[in-house]
Image (tube, rainbow, N blue to C red):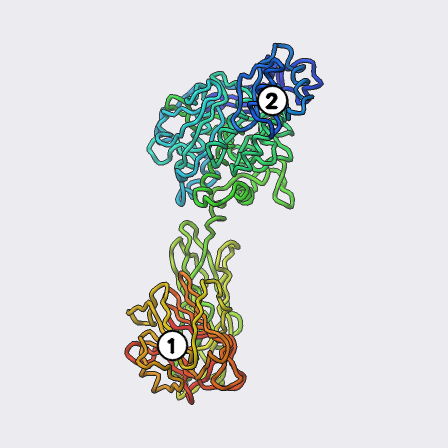
Amino acid sequence: MRKGRLVERTAFAVAIAVALGTAFLLIIALGHRDVASAESITDDAISGEVMVQFQEMVSLAKARDFLSEQGYKVIGEIKNSQVVLLKVPDGQEIQAIRDLQSNPLVKYAEPNYIIRACAEPSLSPAVPNDTYWSKQWNMRKIEAPTAWSVVTGTPQIVVGIIDSGIDDLHPEFQGRILPGYDYVNHDNDPYDDFWHGTHVAGILAAMGNNGIGVAGVAWGVRIRAYKVLDETGEGSYFNLASAIYGAIDDGVRVLNISLGGNEDSDIVREAVRKAHDAGILLVAAVGNDDRRGVYYPAAFPEVLAVAATGADDDRAPYSDYGDEVDLAAPGGDGTPIISTVPNGLYSGAVGTSMATPHVSGAAALLMSLRPDLTNDEVADILKETCDKVGLYVYDSNGWNQYLGYGRINLSRALRRLLPPRVDDLPDSIYFLTNHTNQPIYKRVLLKNESHIYAIPWEATVRGGTGWLALTVPISRTIGPDESQGLTVTMTSNDLPFGVYSGTVTISSPYSDVQGLPHTISVTLQYTSAEIQQYYMPYFPASPPLNVYDEQNIALGDDEYQKLDLPFPVHLPGERKKYTRVWVASNGFVTFRPPAASRAPYRISCESAEHMPATVYVLGDDLDPSAGGRVTAFLGENTVEIQWRDVPFFQSNEEASFRLIFRRDGTIEAIYDSMPDRQRYPTVGVIGTDGTPIGRLTCPGRGRAPSSGQTIRWR
C-alpha cells in the first residue's frame, strides 16, 4: 500500500516518486457503512450491484428462489458462504438493501464497494541480474540471511496472495505457482495485467540464490494467486470475500492481503473469521494515509496488521497507525523495496503493501520448520521476537500504536523455535583420592547443539575452598556445532580425611540458551590409600523417570527374568553390545544367560567375579515375592529397571533403587531409599572378562550406598 493525500475523495492516493521510479500503492475505497440511512450509493461502490449474505440455515437454492420471487437477478455467488451478488436497477441500490435487511432470511446486505489502486509503472525497470541483492536492504534489516542458513521454505507450505494476480512466467517463480483463480475475469488464469501482485509475490517468494534478480523471504514455498484487481488496479469487495473463501477451500497456510479500506464490512469480516478458524494466518497492510485508523481487513482482530518502516528503521511517514497495529516490516520510503514486476522485470515500490509480504514470508518460514504450529502461535512468535526500532516509546508490554511490537526479525523468530542449546554437561563430579594421588583433573565437555548461533559461556566455583578450582580459560564462546572443554581441578592440600563438597556453575549472558545455567555438584572423598579402591563414587541421585512404556517383571525369591532391550547396550570400555539382560531378584542384572537356575544371594568380591558381564546394583538377599515390585520402563534412549520397596529376605527392612541404561553407553545406579541399619551389599560392574570395571564394594570392604546417592559408569 501507498501513502496517499486526500484529494476529492479520501480513497485516492497521490503517487510518491522514488529513486528507481514511481512507487506503487493499493487502497480499497469504500462507501459509508451505514448504508440504510443513505439515499444513494457513493462513487466508491459499483452501480446496480448489491452483496447479500443469508443466514447459515438458508441454502443457496432457497436463497435463489426467494430472490427470484422478489425480482432480483443473481450475477455471482461465493461457494460455501451464503453470499451472493445481485443485479438491481441503477439508483435503487439503497432501497434494495433496506428491503433485504428487513427480511429475517438475510444476515447482511451491503453495496459492492470498489477496490482501487492508485499507481503508475516504474520509469526505470531493471534488467534481471544478481546485482540486486546489494539493493535489498530490507532483507538485511530483518536478518534474513541468518534465517536462510537454516530454512528457505518448504513446498508443503502454500501461501495465498490476494492481489492483482502474478506473472506466472516470471523466472523467479518457475515451478512453484499452484493453480489460483481470477475473480475479475472468472477463469483459472490469474495473470497479473497490472503489476502490484507480482511485486508483492517477489518480496514474499522470489527464488533466492539463482543468479538473477532478487531473493524473496521464503523462496522454497509455493504460492497461489487470487486475482481481485483488474488491469487498472480496480476490483470489487465481493471479489475480495470470494478470494478469502477460495483460499479456505484450497487449504493455504498463510494469506497475504496487501490492500485494504477505511470501511468495515460484515461479509468480509465473516470470511476472515472463517479463514482464521480454518487455521489460516491472515496478514494485511494497515494503510498509507499517515493517519490514525487502520484499514480493513487489517483492523479485524483475526488478522496480523502490518505497518511499514523505512531504510532508517523508523516508521515510514505514510504508514497508518492505531490500536490494531501488530508489528512492522520494511516498506520503504526514499529507498524503495526492489522486487519482481511482470514481463520478467524488476522494479522498486514503497508502501505497507510491500511490508506485508515480509511478514507473510516470515510466517511461512516458521511453518516450514514447524508445520504443527497454529496460526495464532506463529503470529505470537513473530510479535514477541520483533526488534524495538523507531523513535516511538514502547509501553510496558513492548508495544506502541505506530509499529506495534516492532519490526520483524527472522533470526530472532527462528531462534525462538530453535534455541541455542548446550548439552553433555554432567550433573556431578566425584573425586576419590588420597595424599599420594593429586592433583586430579576432570574435563567437562560443553557441546553447542545450535547450527547457527554461537554461545558465550563462563564458569564459576562456589564452595570447595582450598581444594576445588578451574583451569583457565573459564569463559569462551562456542561456535555452532562445536564442543569445548572446561577443566575442573582438585588439590587436597593436606585436608583431613573426610567428604567435602562444592559446585561449578556454567552460565551464559543469553537467557534463552537451553541447558544453561547448569550447576555441577562436586564431591571430594579424601581417604587413605589402603581403603580407597573399595569406595564407590557416590553422588546425589536424580528422580525416577517413569515416562516410558511400563513392563512388570515378576520375580520370586532368588529368581531371574529375561528382559529384551529397545536398543543395544554395552559395558563401559567394551565394544560388545547386548540386546537383552537377565534381571535378578537379588539386585543385579547380568548380560549373559545365567549358568544356574537360581540367582545367588550371598555375593562376595571373589564370587562376583565368577559371573562376568554383570551389573551389581544392590547385590543382597532380596525377596520380591514378599512385597514391593520390580518394573522396567522402556524408552527410545533410556531403560530404567526399578526395584521398588522390595524387602530383604525374612526382614522388615526394604530398599528402593534403580538401574538405568542409556543409549550413549552411560550406566547409572540410583538409590532412592536404603535401610537405616547398615547392610553390606555388593555394588559394582564386572566386565566380560570377569574383572571389575572400576571399584567394587562388597561385604566387609568399602561403604554401602545411602539414600539419595547415585553411581555412574561410562
91 sits to left or right of 427: right
Counting from the top left corner in percent of width and height, residue 413 is at 49, 45
Residue reaching furthest to the top:
90
Above-or-below relation of 436 to 360: below
Q: Which residue is mark 1?
A: 560
Amino acid tagged 1: Tyr
- Mark 2 or mark 1, which is nearer to you? 1
| Foreground pick, 634 / 690 | 634
> Can the viewer see residue 640 in this picture?
yes
262 sits to left or right of 367: right
Q: Which residue is mark 2?
A: 52
* Mark 2 or mark 1, earlier in chain: 2
Q: Secondary structure at mark 2?
A: strand
Counting from the top left corner in percent of width and height, residue 197 is at 46, 25
| Foreground pick, 262 / 131 | 262
Residue reaching furthest to the right:
37
Q: Secondary structure at mark 1?
A: strand
Amino acid tagged 2: Val
Tell me which corner region of the image, top left, top right, bottom left or bottom right, holds residue 173.
top left
Above-or-below relation of 671 to 139: below
714 sits to left or right of 642: left
Above-or-below relation of 686 to 456: below
Mark 2 to mark 1: distance in Å? 78 Å
Bin the neighbour count of mark 1 within 10 Å (Cα to Cα): few under 14, some 14-19, many 20 and up. Answer: many
| Foreground pick, 364 / 33 | 33
Residue at 43% in and 75% down? 711
> Can the viewer see residue 237 in this picture?
no
Q: Which mark is residue 441?
A: none
